[in-house]
Amino acid sequence: MQMNDSQRILAPKDKVWAALNNPDILKQCIPGCQSLEMSTPNEMTATVVLRVGPVKATFGGKVTLSDLDPPNSYRISGEGSGGIAGFAKGGATVSLSEEAPGVTILAYEVDAQIGGKLAQLGARLIDSTAKKLASEFFASFGEIVGGTAVVGA
């Protein structure tokens, strides 16, 4: 699965960058996130509970940040296992640009793979769930970081 989009966030680029690297803020924004802890400056461990169609699973995994270019971009990659429900792994390239003072455009390109029961649900359901989760994340992230979220830059 591949997905890309951009979001306009009403906050300065430095503030958005700091929030993207703050596990407490990310935990509040990631749908179903039970825990998110920084294990090293470039690695986090997470536990997320998700429902995709009829399948509900708790995923545990590791997230790694690489290709860091503060405060402009990074690559985030992760891998998680949901037991019998399957696994998910993938990554995203995230880049920030300043549209105007105090307005940041966050662009992302995601590629992900899933396996197990999740993979049997069908691409349409997986894609619509992924888009819904991304939308929920950015709505929460925009509210926390900038006070409001403007969807669809």
Image: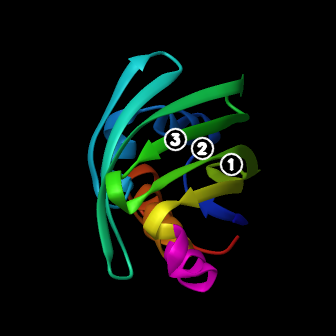
Q: Is residue 2 above or below residue 91?
A: below
Task: Using a 10 Å C-alpha cutoff, classify the residue at mark 1 as few (fewer than 14 neighbours), some (14 to 19) or many (20 or more).
Answer: few
Q: Nearer the viewer, mark 1 or mark 3?
A: 3
* Type of amino acid at the residue the image marks with label 1: Pro
**Percent position (x, y) of residue 50?**
33, 64
**Rendering coords of residue 58 (x, y %):** 28, 54
Residue that sits furthest to the left in the current view: 34
Instruction: Write down the residue under mark 1.
Output: 101
Q: Residue, x 48% and y 62% (percent of image)? A: 116
Does residue 70 appear in this view? no
Cα distance between the residues tagged 1 and 3: 36 Å
Residue of label 2: 12
Q: Is residue 121 magenta?
A: yes
For residue 9, the mark is none
Q: Position of residue 55 (x, y in %)?
A: 33, 74
In front: 124, or 63?
Answer: 124
Image height check: is 28 above or below 119? Answer: above
For the residues carrying marks 3 and 2, which lies nearer the camera in this image?
3
Q: In what quadrant of the picture does the C terminus appear?
A: bottom right
The quarter of the image holding the N terminus is bottom right
Q: Amino acid at mark 3?
A: Glu
Mark 1 and mark 2 in contact? Answer it, CB < 8 Å: yes
Residue type at mark 2?
Pro
- In the rendered image, which residue does mark 3 sit on? 79
Q: Which residues are magenta?
A: 119-129
Chain-order first, disc 3 or disc 2 = 2
Question: Would residue 42 be seen by someone viewing this image from the given angle?
Answer: yes
Calculate the distance from the C-alpha at mark 1 to the C-alpha at mark 2. Answer: 7 Å
